[in-house]
Image (tube, grey):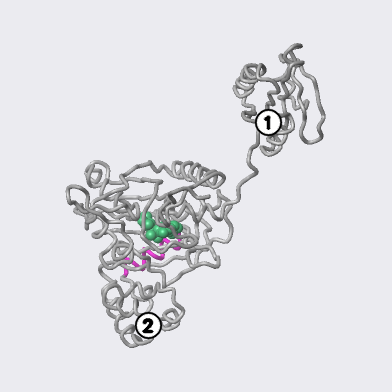
Amino acid sequence: MPGQFQSVQGFNDVLYPDVTKFNRIENTVRELFSLYNFKEIRTPIIEKTGLFVRSIGGSTDIVEKEMYTFKDKGEESLTLRPEGTASAVRAYLEHDIDKKDAVQKWFYIGPMFRHERPQKGRFRQFYQAGIEVFGIDDPVIDAEVIGLAKDVIDALSIKGVVIRLNSIGCPACRPDYIRELKLFLYGVKDQLCDDCQRRIETNPLRVLDCKKHGCIGTTKNAPKITEHLCADCASHFDSVKHGLDLLKIQYTIDTRLVRGLDYYTKTVFEFTVDTNNAQNAVIAGGRYDYLVELLGGGHVPAVGFAMGMERIADLLKLPDERNPDVFIAVLVPRARSKAFELMGMLRQNGIMCDTTYGEKTIKSMMRRAGKLKARVVMIIGEDELEHGYVTLKRMADAHQDKVKESEVLNHILKNSI
Ligand code: HAM
């Protein structure tokens, strides 16, 4: 029976064993991020609304439809962060990092919030683990960042991931491309969905990203951005590809990949998994060379990515879980303190233990031990207490030994039972 309250739609509890997957992902990313010399940051989950409007872009889906925005008691407009990049840049500038040591490699892990229609792989609260690199222009770092994302995927043994790569140019070359794209889109306007018809004016690049079959077909012959890059963007893109080749990382050039946030320039990428649902991007990111400037800083090039932890968890296969080595069956109340004493001693020696609390009969205790998949049951009753021994019963074959209390640890450690 559900209780009086349920969680808010799209906001999920993470229970065992899923939480084990989250821990595994967190441990793996922490280890790899620090191997690449990234330092952790933690920023608040609430920011001033303007930060996201400015950074992500007023005509993006996130800002137009998906932000949890509210007025606090002081009538200030605040927003639950929909992503981590804007907050990282805000913190970078707020703490004058650009003036102290402009080159920074940061990572973060935490919940993000988007008011999307919940479905498989898409939630209203979801966790991201992300990295941001500030102050490095060199395309080598783009390849390194993609290499780090690939290392995470490999370390978690996730198979079937495809890396899609594109360059979406810079303020020097993109406006000309957009003009050409718009001309093309006006020519096929009637065949586009309502959203895309509107996007021709508000955000024409996003038309290329529409998942509707009709729009995909209609824009098949749209001009390609990679054929309109300026010399700087083209050479940057070539170097990123060369870097990935050196790292022996396979990728597919996807000229339709434009990303849903406005701050990107040059390199963009997504790691996708071919599943039956559309929510198949597990990691996504790119370069954003003008965001620091847009938020009031100097010119600081930057690049990063974020991974959706629920989507990664969904693909993760866990090794067998650990079960108790010993379950202690307390047959008489008088044996409780002996059980505590032995349990403490075993745990101090790294042996995983559990015991009975409510069960009254040996039968129900054995059933509980079976449910917990304990390897050995230690039985302590009147006779055991009287004569200073315990009965150890191996669950696999019901073999039993009587073992002196002082010998219990050795007996279990040596796997004599
Ligand atoms: P994003 O593509 O909006 O990029 O999100 C990154 C990843 O977060 C997605 O690929 C997906 O795995 C996960 N994700 C996004 N929305 C949801 C959702 N509603 N439910 C579950 N998972 C979701 C960014 O957020 C950028 N800040 C990435 C970045 C960092 N670019 C540069 N630095």
Q: Taking 53 as reference, is 409 left or right?
A: right
Q: Nearer the viewer, mark 2 or mark 1?
A: 1
Q: Which residue appears at 44% of the width and 65% of the height?
A: 165
Q: Which residues are magenta?
A: 231-243
Asked whether residue 238 appears in the rendered view, the answer is yes
Q: Is residue 138 visible?
A: no
Residue type highlighted by circle 1? Asp
Q: Quadrant of residue 410?
A: top right
Q: What secondary structure is the magenta-colored segment mainly?
A: helix
Q: Is residue 372 left or right of residue 135?
A: right
**Ligand 1 quadrant in view:** bottom left
Residue that protrudes farthest toward the left in the picture: 74
Give residue 378's quadrant in the image: top right
Above-or-below relation of 326 to 41 = above
Task: Say which mark, if any, is on residue 325.
Answer: 1
Pointer 1 local density, CA inside 10 Å: few below 14, some 14–19, many at least 20:
some
Left or right of 12? Residue 60 is left
Mark 2 residue element: loop
Q: Residue at x 44, y 61 (%)?
A: 118
Report the disc number at residue 192.
Answer: 2
Q: Give percent across and percent down for residue 250.
A: 53, 62
